[in-house]
Image: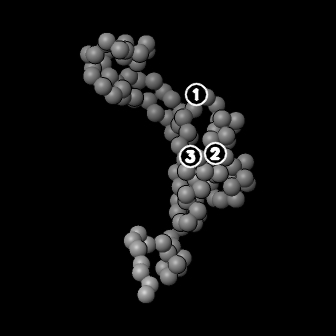
Amino acid sequence: ALEIILDKTIRHEQLCNENHTVPGTVAGMGLGELGIDTVVGSIFWEPSLCWKFHIENIKKKAIGDYRPNSPYGKLLKHFEEIFIPLQIDIIFEYGVLPAEDFETEDILGFSLVL
């Protein structure tokens, strides 16, 4: 469905993460979270699914449209809320096409015309 909506080539990959590391101190229990900091150590085993979507063939000038508050970013957020189960983590990766014309390519800096 996402491939039809975006009109882009999309590859789907399913990953299963088993070892999770909790950042922070190992023995700190003062502001602990139940089930996270109350376990022994900072590494625990719990299988969790992760879906990775590779969105390919995005033009370099259009990659800004996929930022979180941009049109496609909002669309992907709603897609995740509607179609992805809550227990599955999701990652979007973007494949940008190389520049087509170097004459019109944006360059960091400034120019001065007299």
Tell me the crowding category of disc 2: few under 14, some 14 to 19, or many 20 or more residues within 10 angstroms, Cα based: some
Q: Earlier in the sequence, mark 2 or mark 3?
A: 3
Q: Disc 3 residue type? A: Pro
Q: Looking at the picture, tell me which residue is in the foreground, 30 or 46.
A: 30
Question: x, y percentage for residue 16?
Answer: 49, 35
Q: Which mark is residue 22?
A: none
- 29 left or right of 79 in image: left
Q: Is residue 64 above or below residue 88?
A: below
Query: Circle 1 sits on which residue?
Result: 87
Whole-Å distance between the Cαs marked 2 and 3? 6 Å
Question: x, y percentage for residue 26?
Answer: 27, 20
User: Contact (CB < 8 A) between labels 2 and 3?
Assistant: yes
Whole-Å distance between the Cαs marked 3 and 1? 21 Å
Q: Where, quadrant-wise, is the C terminus in this rendering?
A: bottom left
Farthest bottom residue in view:
114
Tell me the crowding category of disc 1: few under 14, some 14 to 19, or many 20 or more residues within 10 angstroms, Cα based: few
Query: Circle 3 sits on which residue?
Result: 68
Residue drawn where x is 55% and y is 39% of the image: 90
Residue drawn where x is 32% and y is 22% of the image: 42
Query: Circle 2 sits on which residue?
Result: 74
Question: Is residue 54 visible to us here?
Answer: no
